[in-house]
Image (cartoon, rainbow, N blue to C red):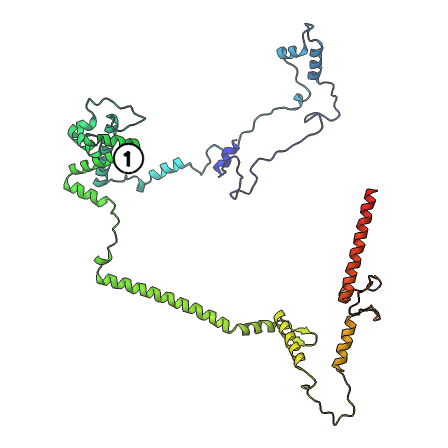
């Protein structure tokens, strides 16, 4: 059975293509590998390996090389050998014939299908060509004879055909006359005054343009030989040339008015679309706060310490503006402008604010002191006096909490230690 042929009849595209129509299946046949042992297929695993006659024959041939003795390999080549071992384990049986014929029943080839279609009653009638089609076909055939005559006379170069001698009559000259042939070639620029020009033309643009010129001249000559009725029939079948649009000066007033009205209507529609788009944008701009409020109201409210529940967290700009406003209010608030509270009906009053002057002095003194984590003052900077380079002053305290003179002394102390450490390293390397 021809499996490849059967699959191709079922729609398979051949080697290198999968069997499905999507192209995602395997494209190569599956290879099955089977190996029983190092001896290969066909021998038992525990069978004796001493019957490898080819190895013994090869060794014996090497030993008898140059002695003139006949080797075992020569006997095998002449007389053959009794097949056994690996070859005795394979038996070829009768071939099984395929179950599919070359031509599938119920399916006919394309050629047979075409023949059956042609035998149908509706398709037996041949297409009857009209007189115009037959006339046009004959005209094109005569035009090709003129081109062949030009090639035969050597007026148009051809690599396929060698130009024949100019003398002697041809079918074209005998049919239309020598004068008609010369007239057509002269009009195409192959003879007479245009001969040199035609040769240059041929060298520059090639043989194809000359052939088209001969076809045009021959067609004009042949059409002139036809009757008036035949010329009319040919002109009707020719495709009409595209009519050029009339200039505006030759247009009628009604056509001009229609075009103007259509142009104005198009501009009006465009303007309405722009206005509609702009109104949509303005509506969104006016209702932007409402949209933000409705969207934020759906979300869970936020809680800010000291403020309470809010719809959203304040932005950085809002926080900055709030701080600046609080600072201005604090600067503008003085003891003179502080609103006096009515304490006539109150038994005692607690001072919760304290003296602002004392608070300023205490804060200024604390700013020049080094305070440890417990709250004890470790060192106090005095104006005009340098801070000693003692690490006990700033040890265990963050540098940001130290006064500026102490931070400066700390940086000087650390730079001195760094230089001393580098000097020790350099001395160690030299030694």
- Seen at 83% across and 45% down, the residue is 428
Residue 377 position, x and y percent, is 83, 70
According to the picture, the residue beneath numbered tag 1 turns out to be: 209
| Farthest front residue in view | 384
Q: Quadrant of residue 118?
A: top left
**245 vs 377: above or below:** above
Horizontally, is 429 left or right of 224 in the view?
Answer: right
Is any part of residue 61 visible from this angle? yes
Residue 123 position, x and y percent, is 31, 41
Q: Quadrant of residue 260?
A: bottom left
Residue 228 position, x and y percent, is 14, 42
Residue 236 position, x and y percent, is 21, 45
- Seen at 70% across and 76% down, the residue is 306
Q: Nearer the viewer, residue 161 or 314?
A: 314
- Seen at 22% across and 62% down, the residue is 253
Determine whether the residue tagged by mark 1 lies in a helix, strand or loop: helix
| Farthest bottom residue in view | 345
């Amino acid at each position: 059975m021809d499996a490849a042929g059967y699959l191709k009849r079922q729609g398979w595209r051949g080697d290198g293509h999968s069997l499905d129509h999507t192209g995602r299946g395997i494209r190569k046949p599956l290879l099955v590998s089977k190996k029983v042992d190092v001896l290969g297929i066909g021998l038992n695993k525990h069978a004796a390996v001493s019957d490898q006659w080819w190895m013994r024959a090869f060794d014996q041939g090497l030993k008898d090389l140059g002695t003139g003795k006949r080797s075992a390999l020569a006997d095998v080549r002449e007389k053959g050998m009794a097949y056994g071992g690996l070859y005795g384990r394979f038996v070829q049986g009768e071939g099984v014939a395929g179950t599919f014929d070359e031509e599938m029943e119920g399916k006919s080839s394309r050629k047979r299908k075409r023949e059956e279609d042609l035998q149908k009653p509706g398709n037996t009638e041949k297409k009857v060509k009209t007189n115009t089609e037959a006339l046009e076909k004959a005209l094109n055939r005569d035009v090709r004879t003129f081109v062949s005559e030009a090639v035969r006379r050597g007026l148009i170069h051809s690599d396929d055909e060698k130009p024949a001698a100019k003398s002697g009559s041809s079918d074209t000259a005998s049919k239309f006359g020598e004068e008609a042939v010369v007239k057509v070639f002269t009009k195409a620029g192959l003879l007479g005054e245009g001969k040199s020009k035609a040769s240059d033309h041929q060298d520059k643009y090639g043989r194809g343009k000359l052939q088209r010129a001969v076809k045009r001249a021959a067609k004009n000559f042949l059409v002139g030989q036809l009757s008036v009725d035949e010329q009319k029939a040919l002109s009707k079948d020719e495709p009409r040339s595209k009519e050029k649009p009339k200039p505006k000066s030759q247009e009628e007033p009604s056509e001009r008015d229609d075009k103007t009205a259509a142009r104005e209507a198009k501009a009006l529609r465009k303007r309405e679309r722009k206005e509609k788009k702009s109104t949509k944008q303005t509506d969104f701009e006016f209702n932007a706060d409402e949209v933000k409020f409705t969207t934020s109201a759906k979300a869970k409210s936020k809680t800010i310490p000291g403020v309470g529940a809010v719809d959203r967290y304040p932005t950085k700009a809002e926080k900055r503006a709030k701080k600046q406003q609080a600072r201005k209010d604090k600067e503008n608030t003085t003891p003179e402008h502080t609103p006096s509270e009515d304490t006539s009906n109150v038994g005692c009053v607690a001072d919760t604010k304290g003296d602002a002057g004392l608070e300023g002095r205490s804060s200024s003194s604390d700013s020049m002191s080094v305070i440890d984590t417990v709250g004890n003052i470790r060192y106090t900077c005095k104006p005009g006096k340098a801070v000693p380079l003692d690490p006990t002053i700033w040890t265990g305290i963050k540098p940001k909490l130290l006064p500026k003179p102490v931070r400066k002394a700390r940086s000087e102390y650390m730079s001195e230690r760094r230089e001393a450490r580098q000097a020790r390293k350099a001395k160690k390397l030299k030694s």
